[in-house]
Image (cartoon, rainbow, N blue to C red):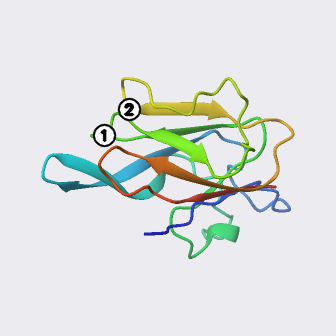
């Protein structure tokens, strides 16, 4: 299953309401027996994509989409999924090397986007026993 997650630098000429907030991404989880897997990722709290007209700008009609910009934090978390890893398909990441890209014991992972980050980043989220969740980050 391929799902797209976009991380967009929200530089909309005065039309974004909260485009400078850190973003928390919450997993929508599905269970198969005692195993929980990711089926979607949703923004919790302020949505950087939200425009004055209520639409989601570049993320309108795109599932699993989040907007952000350099020097802001992105946090992933699950309710039942406590152990997961974020990995990038290329050698580049929008996060500094000291971000381990592994969840802590509470099922959270929080990293700050590098100040010079921009471009497209294809990555996956791995949960043991599940198909990898395959979103995408774009920072502008």
Question: Which part of the image, by quadrant, shows the N terminus?
Answer: bottom left
Q: Toward which corner of the image does residue 73 lie, by quadrant? A: top right
Residue at the left extreme? Answer: 33
Callout 2: helix, strand or loop? loop
Where is residue 105 shown, x and y percent of the image? 37, 23
Image marks 2 and 1: residues in contact by CB distance under 8 Å? yes
Left or right of 61, for residue 103: left
Question: As displayed, is residue 63 above or below residue 68?
Answer: below
Q: Work out whether mark 2 precedes mark 1 in sequence or the reverse, and give the earlier one.
A: 1
**At x 75% / y 44%, what residue is drawn?**
92
Q: Is label 2 or label 1 in front?
A: 2
Q: Mark 1 points at which residue?
A: 79
In the displayed structure, would residue 139 be above or below residue 107?
below
User: Looking at the image, is 18 positioned above or below residue 1?
Assistant: above
Q: Which residue is drawn at 45% across and 55% down?
A: 41
Residue lying at 14% horizontally and 46% vertically, measured from the top left: 34
Which one is nearer the viewer's eye here, 54 or 102?
Answer: 102
Q: How far across and down, in percent of the image, does residue 18 sit?
A: 68, 49
Where is residue 87 drawn, in percent x and y?
57, 44
Reading the image, the residue beneath label 2 is: 107
**Counting other residues with Cα less than 10 Å from the Cα at mark 2, is it few (<14), some (14-19), or many (20 or more)?**
some
Question: Could you tell whether 130 is left or right of 57 in the image?
Answer: left
Give the number of the disc on residue 92.
none
Question: Where is residue 7 drawn, in percent x and y?
Answer: 67, 55
User: Is 117 on the left or on the right of 50, as rendered?
Assistant: right
Label 2 to label 1, Cα distance in Å?
Answer: 7 Å
Secondary element at image label 1: loop
Residue 140 image-quadrant placement = bottom right
For label 1, the crowd category at 10 Å Cα-Cα, with few meaning under 14, some 14 to 19 and many 20 or more, is few
**Viewer-nearest residue: 29 or 84:** 84
């Amino acid at each position: 299953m391929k799902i797209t997650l976009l991380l967009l630098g929200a530089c909309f000429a005065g039309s974004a309401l909260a485009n400078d907030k850190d973003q928390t991404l919450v997993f929508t989880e599905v269970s198969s027996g005692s195993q929980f897997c990711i089926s979607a990722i949703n923004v919790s709290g302020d949505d950087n994509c939200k425009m004055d007209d209520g639409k989601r700008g570049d993320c309108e009609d795109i599932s699993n989409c989040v907007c952000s910009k350099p020097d802001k934090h992105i946090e992933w978390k699950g309710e039942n999924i406590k152990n997961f890893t974020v990995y990038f398909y290329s050698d580049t990441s929008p996060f500094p090397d000291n971000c381990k890209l592994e969840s802590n014991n509470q099922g959270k992972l929080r990293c700050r986007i590098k100040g010079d980050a921009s471009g497209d980043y294809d990555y996956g989220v791995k949960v043991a026993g599940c198909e990898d969740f395959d979103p995408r980050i774009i920072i502008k």
